[in-house]
Image (cartoon, helix red, strand yellow):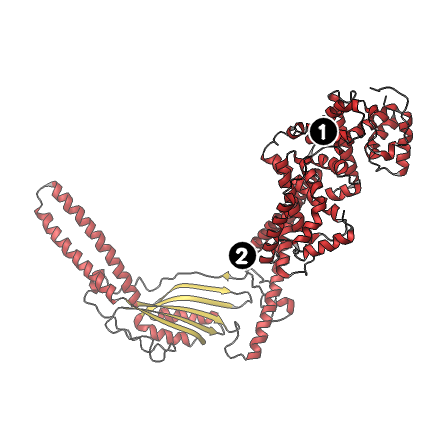
Amino acid sequence: MIDRVKEADLVARVIGGDGDAFAELVEPYEGKVYGLAYRMCGNREDAYDLAQEAFLKVYRALGRFKGDSSFSTWLYRVVANTCLDQLRRAKRSGPATSLDGPIETEKGGVKRELADATFEPESLTLRSEVATEIRTAVALLPPAHRLAILLRDYQDLPYEEIAQAMGCGLGTVKSRISRARALLRDRLVRRELLSQAGVYSVGPARAEPSASVARPARGVDA
Amino acid sequence: MARPPCIKVREMLSAYIDGELSPQARFSVRAHLETCPSCFEKMEALRVISASVRGWPGPELPADFHSALTHKIAAEASTARAGAARVGPLRRGPSWSAGGLGDLWGSLGSRLRRFPLRGAAVVAGLLIFVLWAGSFAFFMGLPVPGAELLGLKRSSEPGALSDTTSQIGFDTNRLGGSASPGGDGVTSEGAPGKDTSFIGAGGATGLGSLSTTGRQVILSVNLTVQCEQVGQARDKAVSAAEATGGFVESLNYWTDSEGLVSASMALRVPAASLSNVLDQLRQLGTVLGEQASRADVTAQHIDLTARINNLRLQEQSLLSLLGKAQSLGDIFAIQSELARIRTDIESYESQLRYLDEQVDLSSIYLSLQPAGAGPGPTSGFWERIVDAFLRSLRWMGGFAEQLAIFLAAVLAPLAVIGGLGWLVWRAVQTRRRRLGA
């Protein structure tokens, strides 16, 4: 990640007409933005176009970047708007083509992901099923909710930056993410995947809050 | 099962696993989780979900992504350099002073693009306002005296503000019979030669002698006279025309915005007495302008006369044929031909009569202006400057007055339109916010 000073310098150079500086400025974000676009629209071609368009918009709008937030936050804001605009347009022009299609084609990817995760080998297949279901469900979330949860869990942005990127309040971010997760959980419950998922057997994904939480000595609660 | 604290805790679980709760809230949630297996399980489920999204594998960034982007940016940059500040990051948003008009335009464009609805509303509003104001001003008569505002040149009638031009009359007194001294149309054959020595030696027109010897000429004169008493002058002009056997064809008489009376009239006088009448009219006051024109219609006259003669001959021969007609069919055919010829003859004769009348009776278009109107031709340089300045001030005052009246008149509808616009705008904003854009 580029530090703020270098970033500001690069921004100034781009505004001064230096196209190479722009390449240098956005290169660290290309993978993340493309990944976000892919998860937002569900296939590689659209994701490619979307990400390119987003960076072009960033380039065109760079003159309006005043440096009062970090460049990455500002960039995600442009990307977020581009994504939502694109999805809105796609929705108007007809139903999206097989939202869950690409997810099914990612079997190999799923396995790879699980291999470097910290889960026990015996839960692999189950986990993979749950994961697939969750990703399908994410693709079916309303765009704003999908974006919020992706910015949180995929891009790993704090709520504050998500709020800036999406141009809404902190409370909205909180409720969107909470609502999105609740929708995903409901879907898992409906598919009877949640109880099989063996949540207790899954190690904590994030260390901070749960590390000190002692698991209550109780069985599965309906 | 869900005890009240559970409900509250569950609302916070999502933020809890993200580490986004305040220290106190985090502490209380953690304390609850230690005692509530149900909530703990839900928290764990959320964590699985979060982890699953986090670990969502995606395709690698395509190898050509960076080069394609760099290429596009380079193309964009060169366009930006070529087309001033229209494209590219050179456009500085709100800092208007940065790059002149191009910048301003670009920024305005981007604003409009960002708020297409608001932009359209503003443009439509302006358009409506301009049209409205324009038509309003047109009907009210814009150049209104704002003299009261400046205490200058008070108008004689305090009440007379904008509804100025009160037309007093539009009479068409046809006095001297319907003219054509020739009597029955065709008699003008052999051209009686309306000899009219036009306007006379003292004519101020400089047209010299418009003598019309032996020719059919229509004479008309535009005369503008400035006089102290328009009312009296008007009466004198009318009687001068009538004394020669002429008549007043039309007459307008009005009070202008400053309470001054003006008149304009169209007089018809016998061609022979035209110069006489003109002399009298010139005595009414200062002659501001005089134009005379003559239209030679001799050729037309000859042409019409010849056609009529021709048709008359045809009529005669048809009549003699009619006497010899044997069959009923012949009679009908001849009679219908006769009818056609007679219609033509009548048409030509009426045209000829009109020409004769025009030739016999010259037209005088007389405009009588009050002495106070307009800058006198003798006023000096500074006086004219001051006058122009005062007039522009008056005009501005009048405009302000009209604007105030106009605004008062449109306040109610504008309030309604504004209210509706605001509602729409708010609805759009709400929707935007809900969509998270």
Which quadrant does the C terminus of chain A fall into? top right
**Residue at the image point whose x is 65% and y is 60% from the top:** B99
Which amino acid type is marked by label 1? Val
**Where does residue A26 sit, x and y in percent of width and height?**
70, 47
The Cα atoms of the two marked residues, 2 and 1, are separated by 77 Å
**Residue at the image point whose x is 24% and y is 62% from the top:** B183
**Where does residue B350 sit, x and y in percent of width and height?**
26, 58
**Residue at the image point whose x is 90% and y is 28% from the top:** B32
- Write down the chain letter for disc 2: B
**Where does residue B280 sit, x and y in percent of width and height?**
39, 75
**Where does residue B200 sit, x and y in percent of width and height?**
33, 78
Residue B221 badge: none
Q: Nearer the viewer, residue A100 or B137?
A: A100
Q: Nearer the viewer, residue A25 or B114?
A: A25
Determine contact: label 2, label 1, CB under 8 Å.
no
Where does label 2 land, which residue?
B139
> Does B49 appear above or below B205?
above
> Does A41 appear above or below B388?
above
Q: Secondary structure at mark 2?
A: helix
Where does label 1 land, which residue?
A110
> Does A76 appear above or below B157?
above
Q: Are marks 2 and 1 on the same chain?
A: no
Q: Horizontal placement of A95 versus A11: left or right?
A: left
Can you see residue B118?
no
Total marks in image: 2
